[in-house]
Amino acid sequence: MSAGLPPAQFFAGLDWAAEVHAVCVMDHAGKIVDRFTIAHTADGITMLIRRLGKLAGPGDVQVGIERPNGRLVDLLLEAGHPVVPVSPNAIKAWRDGEVLSGAKSDAADAAVIAEYLRLRQHRLRVATPYSDDTRALRTVSRTRTDLVDMRVAATNQLSALLDDHWPGAKAVFADVESPISLEFLTRYPTPNSAKHLGEKRMQAFLTKHGYSGRRPATQLLERLRSAPAGASGEALTEALHDTVLALADVLKALNTAVKNLDRSATAHLGEHPDGEIFTSLPRSGQINAAQILAEWGDCRQAYEHPDSVAALAGCTPVTKESGKHRAVHFRWACNKRFRVALTTFADNSRHASPWAANIYNQARASGKDHPHAVRVLARAWIRIIWRCWHDGVPYDPAKHGAAAALNKPVAA
């Protein structure tokens, strides 16, 4: 999160590296007053804070860094230093303009960052740490999303493997990553292992594993038998046995991990002071509400207006003008996790809110495709959420004028 940058006497540029960070400190006139390196260790960070503290009070020593988060950033913020995340692309362009020789070193990069911070401070914003509740929610939500992506990749890999060598096993159940399907693959990983599988044995398998589907054993067995024949070579069968079991184990572990994080996300969302605001949104659910709140954050001064949130979430277009040419483009530079969370909610909300459905339908009627119309709706929702967020009250359709008007019965 970021907020306005206060005045300062000294400007420190920190060139981030995996093990050793270069630091350069300038005064307000551009004179280098200190230059050193620190190790990425507890002692190194302590030395950094101590040396910066000798120059002036923490609030008068701003630190520019090409990284918006991490323990180093957290510790600098805790020490009271204004930390300014700077764009690596901006620093590269600045260096190309300032260092005509093209020479590059960590120490020189630290000086470039300090100079950039000194001269551009009126346009930059200082990082503001998230609350502990928000950081906890963000950690759980982001990890869950990463595990879901891993599950999709593993599912696709297993599906491709079965298509090539064991099509019948994929055809039995609707979802190859479902618990019952993974149990079936664990018990019957190859065509040879299911050679003598009959109706009674299939029914016993379904009963043992609590199959809740509506398909009888005979129909499931027919799906298995009617699929193309699977691999039968001895060496290939052995390899298929090992790979199917390996992927099934991976998917079982991912399913369990995602379920555990679902419970954790729900718990942290319930403990968050703003949790009730985001769960009050129509069709937001628990997980999607947690994802939105985790990326939105809880720092009220970080956003000047709703359009700032919309830009961060990639829901506003980018206009480029040059001479007589004017073009409006999709916004690529944004918090992509935030965009997915908000557009997912917006798309779901139109099935529960007549107001949201009306915004979406108007966008489609104007010629916009589905993703564009959803972004338009997400932008409209951001304005509503912004007001609820600032007022600290959950969303109520009865108090939302446009929504209440659509819900109002028409007189006969």
Image (tube, rainbow, N blue to C red):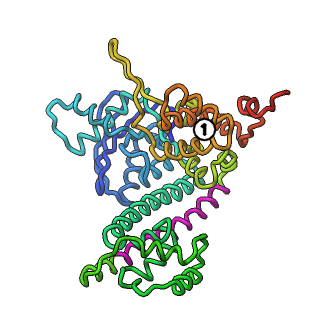
Q: Residue furthest right?
A: 412
Instruction: Residue at 58% x, 31% y: name it.
Output: 306
In the rendered image, is residue 249 in sight?
no
Give the residue at mark 1.
Answer: 300
The relative height of residue 288 versus residue 180 in the rendered view (above or below) is above
| Magenta-highlighted residues | 244-270
Instruction: Residue at 53% x, 59% y: name it.
Output: 140
Q: Position of residue 13 (x, y in %)?
A: 34, 40
Q: Position of residue 404 (x, y in %)?
A: 76, 32
Taking 352 as reference, is 49 left or right? Answer: left
Instruction: Residue at 50% x, 65% y: name it.
Output: 174
Q: Main secondary structure of the magenta part?
A: helix
Res. 364 image quadrant: top right
The relative height of residue 211 versus residue 396 in the rendered view (above or below) is below
Instruction: Residue at 55% x, 78% y: name it.
Output: 217
Going by the numbered disc 1, the residue's amino acid type is: Arg
Viewer-closest of 283 and 31: 283
Viewer-closest of 206 and 77: 206
